[in-house]
Image (cartoon, rainbow, N blue to C red):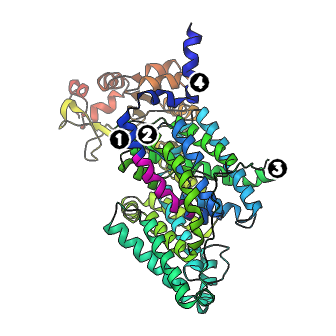
Amino acid sequence: MSVTSASPARFSWLYPFAAWLPSVSRPDLKADLVAALTGAIVVLPQGVAFATIAGMPPQYGLYAGMVPAIIAALFGSSRHLVSGPTTAASVVLFSSLSLLAVPGTPDYVSLALTLTFMVGVMELALGLARMGALVNFISHSVVVGFTAGAAVLIAVKQLKHFFGVQMETEGHVHDILISFFGHAADINPYATAVAVVTLVVGILVKRYLPKFPYMLAAMLAGGVLAIGLDRLFGSAVTQIATVGALPASLPPLSAPSFALDDIRALAPAALAVTLFALTEAVSIGRALGARGGYRIDGNQEFIGQGLSNLAGAFFSGYVATGSFNRSAVNYEAGARTPLAAVFAGFMLMLVVLFVAPLASYLPKATMAAVLFLVAWGLIDREEIRHIIKASGRESAVLGVTVFSALFLDLEFAIFAGVLLSLVLYLERTSKPRLVTVAPDDRLPNRAFSSDPETPQCPQLRLLRIDGSLFFGAVPHLETYVARLRHTHPEQKHLAIVADGINFVDLQGGEALAKEAHRRRAEGGGFYMINVKQGLWEALERCECLDAEGVRNLFQTKEAAIRGIFQKLDKSVCAKCDKRIFLECKGLPKPV
């Protein structure tokens, strides 16, 4: 009976939609349909723009917003998250694949499908392994720095289309800028005029008509101006390049490459894209969940994202993840259930069938201007100022990530930022706070005080440790207590106030045991006060407590002082004028 009841729960990740689909009401359906229509209109210009960033044919950006969005909504856990192509994933894909194939070619598309399949496998595996907390290791500074660096890279790579210049856009930021200034005399004034008008219209609509899709308005303005210039001066004179007509068809079936050489070459990029895509999706899902009053399941979100990319690899989509823009629009448009994202995917298919041929009138200069707007929106200037002002360590992580994105491979920027974050975290935790304390008459119950003016016992050093004692923190502790023995040799007794120690590993336990043996050999003692249950069990597991060590572990300050006081040298106490313990008051007055 227990097996039968457990099986549905064990495989509930296969049909998470069964938990919410039966409760969808008619008002919910109406609200979701309205939100879906808005989402389908918004994704149309974005899909084309993001595919351009990724080096893919423009229609692939639309395909990535169809089947993957439907699968992610059905198998994820968020009510409002909308998946599809995003700027960050597009930039990483381009930077990874442009070194292996020419963008836009069949070989490039095949590699993109393979990368998408690999990302889907990794995401699904992490979700099934219940590794939803993995995204917590990518700090907020890494995300902010990566998106800022990616934004600059996007803008720089679009300079050729913005100004109508025929030039190469390979290499890093400085290489592209040098090439652009070398072609400054070849700027096309007609293309530049189209780009500037597109940019201005996009800014004005976004500012004064926030409910209208500013990208769509900008594209319409740029397209109309280009048509007018062509008719006025002739296309032979203006030479305004266009995107070209998109195929008015549903996403065709596709297949990734399973060649071992391709998989081996794409593995680092796949890992980087996986980590960043999951971070983006889960972060957006959590933010919308907080606003909507519900919680998401990180593991189920991993599974949903993995299945969506696996489906995308076979339905002509490239890497998809949670989109902040479309998710925010979906939420603000009144979506109530994941059906809004499902409906939006199907509506996009219908829209493409009728609108795709019109892309033949869309100038590349207009697309470049739209991508300038996208890039500007990616730079979180307020958060960058906050990070720089708040923390030097996080500022270093931010700076390394940004400059790695600009001057190194983009996927390396993620690894560099994560690695530096972990290094700084380990460096910080490897130096637990070590504070000398003593009973203070001015505090209630003569509590321990770290005030340096508080008198100290000549024979006993009370040391509070705030932090975990693991292998990385042991050298810091050993150096500190060795310095204490050298500067205060008369304090042969050492008591550790341990209520700030949450964890101790084998090496940390052995360090405490060695200090205890050393103190006893020198005629003193080693004690621990306020030992937590978890710390006690850890010391027992590593066999770092002998019989005497167990006797020197105390659960309260009062018991510790009474026990330690009995072991102090009373001849020294007779001459001491500190008398910081209550037990000292029973001694004769100091000579």
Q: Which residues are magenta?
A: 34-48
Q: Callout 4, which amino acid?
A: Phe
Residue density around tag 1, few if under 14, some if 14–19, many if 20 or more, within 10 Å:
some
Give the SS element for disc 3: loop
Q: Label 3 near label 2: C-beta < 8 Å? A: no
Q: Label 1 near label 2: C-beta < 8 Å? A: yes
Cα gap from disc 3 to disc 1, whole angstroms: 44 Å
Q: Callout 2, which amino acid?
A: Arg
The residue that label 3 is drawn on is: 259
Cα gap from disc 4 to disc 3, whole angstroms: 32 Å
Cα gap from disc 2 to disc 4, whole angstroms: 21 Å
Between 323 and 410, the one nearer to me in the picture: 323
Cα gap from disc 2 to disc 3, whole angstroms: 38 Å
The residue that label 4 is drawn on is: 11
Picture quadrant where residue 579 is located: top left
The circle on residue 292 is 1
Between 95 and 499, the one nearer to me in the picture: 95
Cα gap from disc 4 to disc 1, whole angstroms: 27 Å
The residue that label 2 is drawn on is: 79
Residue density around tag 2, few if under 14, some if 14–19, many if 20 or more, within 10 Å:
many
Give the SS element for disc 4: loop
Horizontal side, residue 449 vs residue 214: left or right: left
Residue 155, above or below 574: below
Q: Callout 3, which amino acid?
A: Ala
